[in-house]
Amino acid sequence: SGFRRGGIIPTFIFLSLLLSLCSPVMMPRVARFRSSLLVRACLAAVLLATWWCHSSVSTSAFLATRTRCDAKTGRTSDERRYLTARRSSVVDSVENNVKTVANTLDAFFEGYPKPPVLPMYRTFLVDLMTQAHLAIVDSRFKYNAIFGLGLKKAFGGLMGTYDKTMGGQPETEKIWKAMVEALGLSMETVDSDAAAMESYASTTSPADILAHMEGSSESVASEAFSTIKSSLYNLNLGVGIFQMMETSKVDVKKENVEEWAKALKIRPAKITADLEVYKMNRKKLQAAEEMIREVEIREKKKLAERLEAKAKALAEKAKASTQTSEGEAKTESADTTK
């Protein structure tokens, strides 16, 4: 098919190859060497020409139009075959229903449009939402009350001083509601679950909690413990476990965390790694709170100095006014005597 479509050029290549194959016997050594180079070049040219011809035939077949005749109307129409091939893409045929991080953030900012979240809090808040979103959209995720406790405590630790920073305006609750709803959860459910887990941890001994985790007896947290064993572990779940340990007066250290992880069938390496992140984040939050307190102290000191200066200025002004009044009174008395 290459010679049939290629025409003169492939024919010339073929004749050159034939002559080069016949000539080396009658040529000296140098001529034979040059002839071998010519043979290799001709072979490469033949292969290239054959590929080009085959490619041209395939492309023509792909781009060729096909005439269709409608039996009802009798009209004919041409269709390009390549359109069908392009429209049969796998991407076009698969619908992606998974919610993206961008969708969650857009939903949050729609739920809390203004005032804008302060820059020093915004980065941490977006990071918290991103972590929670990635856990929730995973097919292995199952919501439980301890996850709700961890999410609420992580948010509370981050935004605990936000209202004070905003001058006492109650914005934290609005931000919490917008965040939880953006994640596809119910604020009332998360709040009630978190309160129930805190109450359970504060009224139950660590030994009984471990027994409940292992399933030897029932409790209000049994459903949550059972869900943890069969679902995806994530950072907010770890925070919930750490909070329960603190509430039940258990020292949150590696050995105790590994014991609880074993009872919940969580890989110890995962939860101990999250323990380090948890402690580091707490130190950062404590440092941020300390900085905010220092700023408040400086602002109060400046305000006190301004008020003192203002009071001093008012006192001097009042004194000057009194002296002026006394001087005017003396002048009037002197005029009267005259």
Image: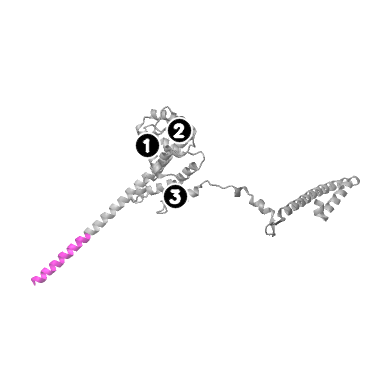
* Location of residue 76 in the rendering, given as x and y in whole percent from the top left corner: 70, 59
Q: Residue furthest right?
A: 26
Q: Residue 73 is drawn in which quadrant?
A: bottom right
* Location of residue 314 in the rendering, given as x and y in whole percent from the top left corner: 23, 59
| Magenta region | 316-338
Of the two numbered discs 3 and 1 on the same chain, state the one appearing first in sequence.
3
Front position among marks 3 and 2 = 2
Q: Are marks 1 and 2 in contact (CB under 8 Å)?
A: no
What residue do we see at 12% from left, 69% from top?
332
Query: Which of these two is toward me, 212 or 121?
Result: 212
Can you identify the residue that label 3 sits on? 108
What residue do we see at 38% from left, 34% from top?
246
Three-letter residue code for mark 1 = Glu
Residue 272 appears in the picture as rendered: no
Can you identify the residue that label 2 sits on? 226
* Location of residue 262 in the rendering, given as x and y in whole percent from the top left corner: 46, 30
Measured in 3D between alpha carbons, the distance from the residue under mark 3 to the one under mark 2, in whole angstroms, is 31 Å
> Please, what secondary structure does the residue beneath circle 1 have?
helix
Q: Residue furthest left?
A: 337
Label 1 neighbour load within 10 Å: few <14, some 14-19, many 20+: many
Q: Residue 200, relative to residue 183: is it above or below?
A: above
> Please, what secondary structure does the residue beneath circle 2 have?
helix
Q: Residue furthest front?
A: 72
Residue 105 appears in the picture as rendered: yes
Can you identify the residue that label 1 sits on? 198
Measured in 3D between alpha carbons, the distance from the residue under mark 1 to the one under mark 2, in whole angstroms, is 18 Å
Front position among marks 1 and 2 = 2
What residue do we see at 18% from left, 65% from top?
324
> Please, what secondary structure does the residue beneath circle 3 have?
helix
Measured in 3D between alpha carbons, the distance from the residue under mark 3 to the one under mark 1, in whole angstroms, is 27 Å
